[in-house]
Amino acid sequence: LIQPTDLGVCSYTVSGSGFDVTANDNCDILSITHNYTGAPLSSTLDGAEFAAGTTVVTWIAEDLSGNKDTCEIEIEILDSQAPVLAPGSNCPADAVLAANLNECEQIYTWTPPSEALDLCDGSILRTSGQIREVLIDPKGDTSSIFPQFDYDMQPITGGFIQQAQFPVGVSRILYIASDNEGNSDTICEFTVTIQDLEVPVIICPADQILTTNCDEFPIPNYTALPNVQDNCPKNITVS
């Protein structure tokens, strides 16, 4: 019998008679009992709580003459609980910074969460294979920060990144922990917002003199003539 752990805990609680056995006898059955002490009653496993792992339960059937027979069932409870942020390991707060003067980016330094906790076996997860960093940049692109990252970066011991140069916009950094059973979840997420606070500089063309012989003359589109300079030139619109 195989069951996953209940939601939010590292155990499974039986509901109903699905784990109970039946017995037949040429006469009458006196009792059918089991030896599992984690059940409310010895006659049924309804309400019994099983921890993650494998438990062997022995059932005993006895008739009115004292004849007995036994059978064993193996109950395997699979760890389905994702790791969580370990106590004492902090998740950075969201950060908001202005872009560097005359630039469209800014460097930000943070302290990554150092450890995750496996709720079922109590082990600590701390290597780059157990915890990985993921970046979602302002364009919505997702990439692994380690070992490949499309911004300037400074790695630290253990393979995590603690400093990067972010473009204007909102970037998200996630830390995803995985345990030995393949359960994974985001244990930490924060955003880095880089704001463009510099106003663009516009240099207007000289005054224009137009001649026409008609009563009406359409005004040309001069939006291409001004010389516009900005620290984030890709975000410029002229109207």
Image (cartoon, rainbow, N blue to C red):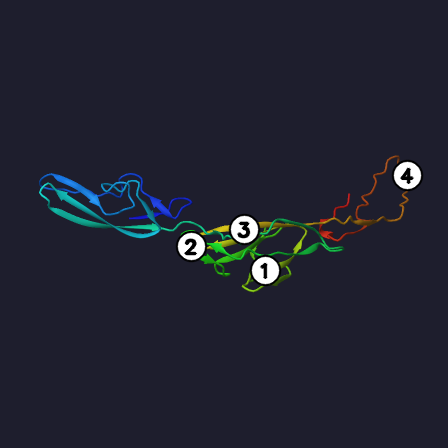
**Mark 1: few, some, or many residues within 10 Å (few <14, many ≥20)?**
many
Type of the residue with mark 4: Asn
Q: Which residue is mark 4?
A: 213
Residue shown at the point (14%, 48%) measured from the top left: 69
Q: Position of residue 208 (x, y in %)?
A: 89, 45
| Quadrant of residue 214 within the rendered picture | top right
Left or right of residue 124: residue 11: left
| Camera-side mark, 4 or 2 | 2
Q: Position of residue 201 (x, y in %)?
A: 81, 50
Q: Which residue is mark 1?
A: 161
Task: Using the numbered discs, state the Cα–Cα distance from disc 3 to disc 4 in whole angstroms.
Answer: 70 Å
Task: Using the numbered discs, state the Cα–Cα distance from disc 1 to disc 4 in whole angstroms.
Answer: 68 Å
Left or right of residue 148: residue 204: right
Q: Which residue is mark 3?
A: 188
Type of the residue with mark 2: Gly
Q: Which residue is mark 2?
A: 122
Task: Using the numbered discs, state the Cα–Cα distance from disc 4 to disc 2 in whole angstroms.
Answer: 89 Å
| Camera-side mark, 2 or 1 | 2
